[in-house]
Amino acid sequence: RKEVEQDPGPFNVPEGATVAFNCTYSNSASQSFFWYRQDCRKEPKLLMSVYSSGNEDGRFTAQLNRASQYISLLIRDSKLSDSATYLCVVKEDGGFKTIFGAGTRLFVKA
Amino acid sequence: DTEVTQTPKHLVMGMTNKKSLKCEQHMGHRAMYWYKQKAKKPPELMFVYSYEKLSINESVPSRFSPECPNSSLLNLHLHALQPEDSALYLCASSQLPGQSAGELFFGEGSRLTVL
Protein backbone atom coordinates (compact mmCIF):
# COMPACT_ATOMS: atom_id res chain seq x y z
CA ARG A 1 0.00 0.00 0.00
CA LYS A 2 1.34 3.43 -0.92
CA GLU A 3 1.98 5.85 1.95
CA VAL A 4 -0.20 8.55 0.39
CA GLU A 5 -2.84 7.71 -2.19
CA GLN A 6 -4.87 10.11 -4.28
CA ASP A 7 -7.69 9.91 -6.79
CA PRO A 8 -6.04 9.02 -10.09
CA GLY A 9 -7.76 11.69 -12.21
CA PRO A 10 -7.69 13.40 -14.54
CA PHE A 11 -10.73 15.44 -13.66
CA ASN A 12 -12.30 17.35 -16.55
CA VAL A 13 -14.85 19.90 -15.34
CA PRO A 14 -16.58 22.99 -16.79
CA GLU A 15 -16.01 26.44 -15.41
CA GLY A 16 -18.14 27.07 -12.36
CA ALA A 17 -18.25 23.43 -11.31
CA THR A 18 -17.48 22.11 -7.85
CA VAL A 19 -14.84 19.41 -7.72
CA ALA A 20 -13.53 17.34 -4.83
CA PHE A 21 -10.25 15.50 -4.45
CA ASN A 22 -9.60 12.78 -1.91
CA CYS A 23 -6.44 11.48 -0.35
CA THR A 24 -5.66 8.70 2.15
CA TYR A 25 -2.49 8.19 4.17
CA SER A 26 -1.18 5.06 5.82
CA ASN A 27 0.89 6.36 8.75
CA SER A 28 -1.44 7.11 11.66
CA ALA A 29 1.36 9.07 13.36
CA SER A 30 1.39 11.69 10.61
CA GLN A 31 0.77 15.15 11.99
CA SER A 32 0.93 17.72 9.25
CA PHE A 33 -1.08 17.76 6.07
CA PHE A 34 -1.04 20.03 3.05
CA TRP A 35 -2.37 20.51 -0.43
CA TYR A 36 0.10 21.77 -3.01
CA ARG A 37 -0.62 22.89 -6.53
CA GLN A 38 1.81 22.27 -9.38
CA ASP A 39 1.51 23.79 -12.82
CA CYS A 40 3.10 22.10 -15.80
CA ARG A 41 6.91 22.32 -15.64
CA LYS A 42 6.77 24.52 -12.54
CA GLU A 43 7.57 23.95 -8.90
CA PRO A 44 4.95 22.83 -6.36
CA LYS A 45 3.37 25.71 -4.48
CA LEU A 46 1.58 25.51 -1.16
CA LEU A 47 -2.17 25.84 -1.68
CA MET A 48 -3.20 25.34 1.92
CA SER A 49 -2.40 23.52 5.11
CA VAL A 50 -5.08 21.15 6.42
CA TYR A 51 -6.20 21.46 10.01
CA SER A 52 -8.16 19.02 12.13
CA SER A 53 -11.15 21.34 12.33
CA GLY A 54 -11.17 21.85 8.57
CA ASN A 55 -10.29 25.14 6.96
CA GLU A 56 -11.38 27.33 4.11
CA ASP A 57 -9.55 29.80 1.91
CA GLY A 58 -11.87 31.51 -0.54
CA ARG A 59 -13.15 28.89 -2.96
CA PHE A 60 -11.02 26.15 -1.43
CA THR A 61 -12.01 24.00 1.54
CA ALA A 62 -9.80 21.33 3.12
CA GLN A 63 -10.94 18.64 5.50
CA LEU A 64 -9.06 16.12 7.64
CA ASN A 65 -10.50 12.94 9.11
CA ARG A 66 -7.87 11.42 11.39
CA ALA A 67 -9.98 8.38 12.26
CA SER A 68 -10.24 7.40 8.60
CA GLN A 69 -6.81 8.83 7.70
CA TYR A 70 -8.42 10.82 4.94
CA ILE A 71 -7.90 14.31 3.55
CA SER A 72 -10.04 16.15 1.06
CA LEU A 73 -9.94 19.31 -1.01
CA LEU A 74 -13.07 20.97 -2.37
CA ILE A 75 -12.88 23.61 -5.08
CA ARG A 76 -16.01 25.65 -5.66
CA ASP A 77 -16.79 27.77 -8.73
CA SER A 78 -13.85 26.35 -10.71
CA LYS A 79 -11.85 28.78 -12.83
CA LEU A 80 -9.79 28.07 -15.93
CA SER A 81 -6.76 29.08 -13.87
CA ASP A 82 -7.42 26.22 -11.43
CA SER A 83 -6.19 23.76 -14.07
CA ALA A 84 -3.14 22.13 -12.50
CA THR A 85 -1.99 19.05 -10.64
CA TYR A 86 -3.00 18.94 -6.99
CA LEU A 87 -0.64 17.11 -4.66
CA CYS A 88 -1.67 15.73 -1.29
CA VAL A 89 1.26 15.99 1.11
CA VAL A 90 1.75 14.38 4.51
CA LYS A 91 4.51 15.10 6.99
CA GLU A 92 5.59 12.58 9.58
CA ASP A 93 5.34 13.54 13.21
CA GLY A 94 8.35 15.46 14.45
CA GLY A 95 10.40 14.73 11.39
CA PHE A 96 11.50 16.11 8.08
CA LYS A 97 10.18 13.37 5.88
CA THR A 98 7.44 14.74 3.64
CA ILE A 99 5.48 12.26 1.55
CA PHE A 100 3.82 13.37 -1.67
CA GLY A 101 0.84 11.69 -3.24
CA ALA A 102 1.05 10.99 -6.95
CA GLY A 103 -1.12 14.03 -7.70
CA THR A 104 -4.48 14.55 -9.34
CA ARG A 105 -4.67 16.40 -12.62
CA LEU A 106 -7.50 18.92 -13.00
CA PHE A 107 -8.61 20.41 -16.31
CA VAL A 108 -11.17 23.21 -16.14
CA LYS A 109 -12.78 23.96 -19.50
CA ALA A 110 -14.67 27.00 -20.73
CA ASP B 1 7.85 35.20 -6.53
CA THR B 2 9.63 32.34 -4.85
CA GLU B 3 12.00 33.16 -2.00
CA VAL B 4 14.06 30.08 -2.77
CA THR B 5 16.39 30.70 -5.69
CA GLN B 6 17.94 27.92 -7.74
CA THR B 7 20.65 28.11 -10.37
CA PRO B 8 21.03 27.18 -13.11
CA LYS B 9 17.47 26.86 -14.39
CA HIS B 10 18.60 24.49 -17.11
CA LEU B 11 21.69 22.30 -17.31
CA VAL B 12 22.87 19.88 -19.97
CA MET B 13 25.83 17.71 -19.12
CA GLY B 14 27.67 14.68 -20.36
CA MET B 15 28.15 11.54 -18.31
CA THR B 16 31.77 12.42 -17.57
CA ASN B 17 31.13 16.02 -16.52
CA LYS B 18 31.18 17.48 -13.04
CA LYS B 19 28.61 20.19 -12.33
CA SER B 20 26.80 21.70 -9.38
CA LEU B 21 23.30 22.88 -8.66
CA LYS B 22 22.89 25.78 -6.25
CA CYS B 23 20.09 26.86 -3.98
CA GLU B 24 19.71 29.92 -1.76
CA GLN B 25 16.96 30.93 0.65
CA HIS B 26 16.56 34.06 2.76
CA MET B 27 13.59 33.06 4.88
CA GLY B 28 15.68 32.11 7.92
CA HIS B 29 14.72 28.47 7.54
CA ARG B 30 17.09 25.96 9.14
CA ALA B 31 15.95 22.94 7.14
CA MET B 32 16.76 22.56 3.46
CA TYR B 33 15.90 19.78 1.06
CA TRP B 34 16.74 18.35 -2.34
CA TYR B 35 13.98 16.62 -4.30
CA LYS B 36 14.08 14.91 -7.69
CA GLN B 37 11.03 14.97 -9.93
CA LYS B 38 10.54 12.99 -13.11
CA ALA B 39 7.83 13.88 -15.60
CA LYS B 40 4.28 13.15 -14.40
CA LYS B 41 5.59 11.86 -11.06
CA PRO B 42 5.56 13.47 -7.61
CA PRO B 43 8.74 14.88 -6.09
CA GLU B 44 10.98 12.29 -4.43
CA LEU B 45 13.02 13.24 -1.40
CA MET B 46 16.80 12.93 -1.82
CA PHE B 47 18.45 14.77 1.08
CA VAL B 48 17.53 16.86 4.11
CA TYR B 49 19.82 19.25 5.98
CA SER B 50 19.01 20.54 9.44
CA TYR B 51 21.26 23.20 11.00
CA GLU B 52 23.65 22.66 8.09
CA LYS B 53 24.05 18.98 8.94
CA LEU B 54 22.83 16.10 6.81
CA SER B 55 19.78 14.60 8.51
CA ILE B 56 18.34 12.36 5.82
CA ASN B 57 19.89 10.63 2.81
CA GLU B 58 17.26 8.58 1.03
CA SER B 59 19.80 6.05 -0.26
CA VAL B 60 20.84 8.36 -3.05
CA PRO B 61 23.72 7.14 -5.27
CA SER B 62 27.08 8.69 -4.45
CA ARG B 63 27.24 10.39 -7.83
CA PHE B 64 25.02 12.98 -6.12
CA SER B 65 26.88 14.81 -3.35
CA PRO B 66 25.06 17.43 -1.26
CA GLU B 67 26.72 20.27 0.58
CA CYS B 68 25.36 22.92 2.92
CA PRO B 69 28.01 25.65 3.33
CA ASN B 70 25.80 27.82 5.56
CA SER B 71 22.22 28.23 6.68
CA SER B 72 21.18 29.97 3.46
CA LEU B 73 22.95 27.87 0.85
CA LEU B 74 22.55 24.32 -0.40
CA ASN B 75 24.50 22.74 -3.22
CA LEU B 76 24.17 19.48 -5.10
CA HIS B 77 27.36 18.30 -6.76
CA LEU B 78 26.92 16.05 -9.75
CA HIS B 79 29.51 13.64 -11.13
CA ALA B 80 29.36 10.73 -13.55
CA LEU B 81 25.61 10.93 -13.93
CA GLN B 82 23.52 8.61 -16.06
CA PRO B 83 20.88 9.58 -18.64
CA GLU B 84 18.17 8.30 -16.25
CA ASP B 85 19.22 11.01 -13.80
CA SER B 86 17.68 13.58 -16.14
CA ALA B 87 14.92 15.25 -14.14
CA LEU B 88 13.79 18.43 -12.44
CA TYR B 89 15.79 18.96 -9.24
CA LEU B 90 13.90 20.96 -6.67
CA CYS B 91 15.32 22.67 -3.65
CA ALA B 92 13.02 23.46 -0.73
CA SER B 93 13.30 24.96 2.72
CA SER B 94 11.16 24.90 5.84
CA GLN B 95 11.14 25.81 9.47
CA LEU B 96 12.23 23.08 11.83
CA PRO B 97 9.74 20.52 13.18
CA GLY B 98 7.99 21.99 16.18
CA GLN B 99 8.38 25.56 14.95
CA SER B 100 5.58 25.23 12.42
CA ALA B 101 3.57 22.63 10.55
CA GLY B 102 6.60 22.34 8.34
CA GLU B 103 5.38 23.75 5.06
CA LEU B 104 7.92 23.36 2.30
CA PHE B 105 8.78 26.32 0.11
CA PHE B 106 10.21 25.29 -3.24
CA GLY B 107 12.53 26.96 -5.69
CA GLU B 108 11.68 26.93 -9.38
CA GLY B 109 13.94 23.95 -9.91
CA SER B 110 16.91 23.10 -12.10
CA ARG B 111 16.02 21.06 -15.15
CA LEU B 112 18.87 18.65 -15.77
CA THR B 113 19.52 16.71 -18.96
CA VAL B 114 22.27 14.09 -18.99
CA LEU B 115 23.47 13.08 -22.43
Image (cartoon, coloured by chain):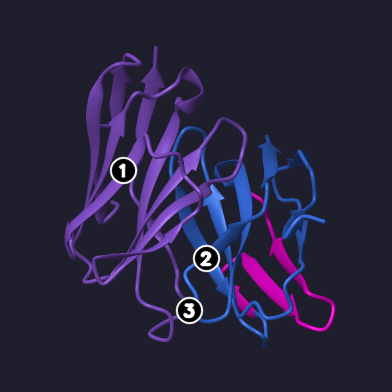
Chain colours: A blue, B purple
- Horizontal side of A34 relative to B50 (left or right) equals right
Residue A79 visible somewhere in the drawing: no
Q: Chain of mark 2?
A: A
State the image coordinates of residue B99 (x, y, percent, origin top left). Answer: 38, 85
The circle drawn on residue A82 is: none
The residues colored magenta run: A55-79
* Residue at the image point whose x is 76% and y is 42% from the top: A13
* Residue at the image point whose x is 61% and y is 82% from the top: A51
Say which element carries label 3. Answer: loop
Q: Quadrant of residue B27?
A: bottom left
State the image coordinates of residue B62 (x, y, percent, origin top left). Answer: 39, 39
Residue B22 visible somewhere in the drawing: yes
Q: Is residue A64 magenta?
A: yes
Q: Quadrant of residue B94?
A: bottom left
- Horizontal side of A107 relative to A43 (left or right) equals right
Which amino acid type corresponds to the residue marked 1 in the rendered image?
Ser
Q: Nearer the viewer, residue B97 or B69?
A: B69
Q: Chain of mark 3?
A: B
**Residue annotated with mark 1:** B65
Is disc 2 in the same subunit as disc 3? Answer: no
**Residue annotated with mark 2:** A97
Q: Chain of mark 1?
A: B
| Neighbours of disc 2 within 10 Å: few (<14), some (14-19), many (20+) | some
State the image coordinates of residue B45 (x, y, percent, origin top left). Answer: 50, 52
**Residue annotated with mark 3:** B101
Which amino acid type corresponds to the residue marked 2 in the rendered image?
Lys
